[in-house]
């Protein structure tokens, strides 16, 4: 987004470009957000540690796309390969960038992986987030936005999940670190008057997705004639959120920094009574059963899956459903892409990316 500013009394216009600093820019969501911001005329400063949690070549391919989207020979997209735990380098990047907006998406993701390598979640999600918060404190952007997760609702059973529901019972370390992030962000929003929004993502999927996510794994296995693992005997439901819907929501939220003492009227707003801090669900509130989701994939691929039915895994929940009322009140937008549309687009991308006829 470009802004025209008039200087003095003359007729000369000066165009200024807004700058966003995006962590996790080579990741699934960070890539899509950066590409959208570049298309909207922003300068994007990207940070990513390029870890090998999954195939680094996919991350590199995303970066190639972003360099092209930023325009060859321009500085619209600038990339820094650095781990969030490197406090000195993170501080240096913030000092150079002086961003208008910061969107913190980098994290150690994955519910199941947190059972195998819990320390990675402490290092990245707690120490790394703290270093980003310090950068935000020093640079004081107009709006600081950070990713949380629907997993913070943990053992809650009342649906849909609302932002003001209690989130005191996370059932994985991943969820616990994200709950801790929300509390950490609130403290800095209060202490330093930093307008901050945390958004809780609900099962995001789509083109350029992560290989450890269900849709990616299912498509890959079905095309290879290999069995797919179906946990909870397929009785689980998820509020699947298509990536374009999520990005539209985030870009609209960027323009809606919370103001202390100014809650949205007529709705249960999560705005803090002590800080310019708010948490917002990003999900459509239309859960889909796991088996119907798999059947949608089968129809799109024209093949049946070999189903390996398994019990629930530790840390899994039966169902997630987002209340999107606050998101809609703030932005006028509610995710609405159907699973049929989203799966079709993912499969088309997958076939193209891996050159599968």
Image: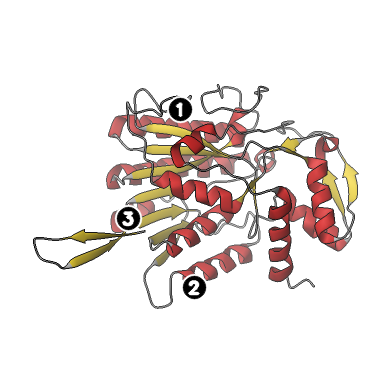
Q: Tag 1: Cα neighbours inside 10 Å, few (<14), some, or many (≥20)? A: some
Rendering quarter of residue 321: top right
Q: Which mark is residue 92?
A: 3
Find the residue positioned furthest to the left.
9
Q: Earlier in the sequence, mark 3 or mark 1?
A: 3
Q: Residue at 44% of width from left, 54% of height from top?
A: 22
Horizontal and vertical percent position of residue 327: 50, 37
Q: Is residue 256 left or right of residue 310?
A: left
Horizontal and vertical percent position of residue 71: 43, 74
Q: Is residue 121 left or right of residue 138?
A: right
Q: Earlier in the sequence, mark 3 or mark 2?
A: 2
Instruction: Locate the C terminus and report the quarter of the image it occupies.
Output: bottom right
- Per the image, label 3 sits on a secondary structure element best described as helix
Q: CA distance from mark 2 to mark 1?
A: 39 Å
Horizontal and vertical percent position of residue 94: 33, 53
Q: Nearer the viewer, residue 243 or 28?
A: 243
- Per the image, label 2 sits on a secondary structure element best described as helix
Horizontal and vertical percent position of residue 126: 49, 38
* 3 and 2 marks in contact (CB < 8 Å): no
Q: Earlier in the sequence, mark 2 or mark 1?
A: 2
Q: CA distance from mark 3 to mark 1?
A: 33 Å
Res. 87 in view: no
Discs 2/1, front: 1
Res. 142 in view: yes
How was the colour assigned to the protein in this rendering? secondary structure
Q: Which mark is residue 270?
A: 1
Q: Nearer the viewer, residue 185 or 238?
A: 238
Q: Tag 2: Cα neighbours inside 10 Å, few (<14), some, or many (≥20)? A: some
Rendering quarter of residue 172: top right
Q: CA distance from mark 3 to mark 2?
A: 26 Å
| Residue position marked by numbered label 2 in the rendering | 68
- Per the image, label 1 sits on a secondary structure element best described as loop
């Amino acid at each position: 987004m470009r802004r025209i500013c008039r200087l003095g009394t003359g007729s000369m216009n000066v165009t200024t470009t807004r700058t966003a600093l995006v962590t996790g820019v080579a990741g699934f969501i960070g890539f899509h957000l950066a590409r959208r911001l570049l298309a909207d005329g922003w300068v994007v400063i990207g940070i990513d540690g390029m870890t090998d949690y999954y195939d680094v070549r996919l991350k590199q391919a995303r970066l190639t796309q972003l360099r092209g989207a930023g325009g060859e020979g321009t500085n619209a997209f600038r990339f820094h390969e650095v781990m969030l735990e490197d406090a000195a380098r993170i501080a240096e990047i913030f000092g150079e960038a002086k961003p208008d907006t910061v969107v913190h998406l980098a994290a150690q993701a994955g519910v199941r992986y947190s059972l195998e390598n819990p320390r990675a979640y402490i290092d990245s999600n707690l120490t790394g987030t703290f270093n980003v918060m310090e950068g935000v404190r020093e640079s004081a952007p107009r709006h600081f936005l950070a990713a949380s997760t629907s997993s913070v609702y943990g053992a809650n059973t009342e649906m849909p999940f609302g932002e003001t529901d209690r989130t005191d019972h996370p059932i994985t370390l991943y969820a616990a670190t994200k709950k801790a992030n929300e509390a950490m962000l609130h403290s800095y929003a209060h202490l330093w008057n930093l307008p901050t929004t945390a958004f809780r993502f609900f099962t995001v999927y789509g083109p350029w997705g992560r290989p450890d996510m269900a849709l990616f794994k299912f498509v890959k296995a079905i095309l290879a004639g290999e069995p797919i693992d179906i946990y909870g005997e397929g009785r689980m439901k998820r509020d699947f959120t298509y990536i374009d819907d999520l990005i539209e929501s985030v870009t609209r939220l960027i323009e809606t920094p919370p103001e202390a003492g100014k809650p949205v009227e007529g709705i249960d707003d999560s705005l803090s009574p002590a800080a310019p801090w708010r948490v917002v669900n990003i999900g459509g509130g239309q859960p889909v059963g796991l088996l119907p989701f798999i059947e949608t994939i089968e129809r799109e691929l024209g093949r049946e899956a070999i189903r390996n039915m398994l019990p629930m895994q530790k840390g899994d929940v039966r169902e997630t459903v987002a209340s999107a009322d606050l998101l809609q009140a703030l932005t006028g937008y509610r995710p609405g892409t159907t699973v049929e549309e989203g799966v079709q687009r993912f499969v088309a991308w997958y076939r193209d990316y891996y050159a599968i006829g």
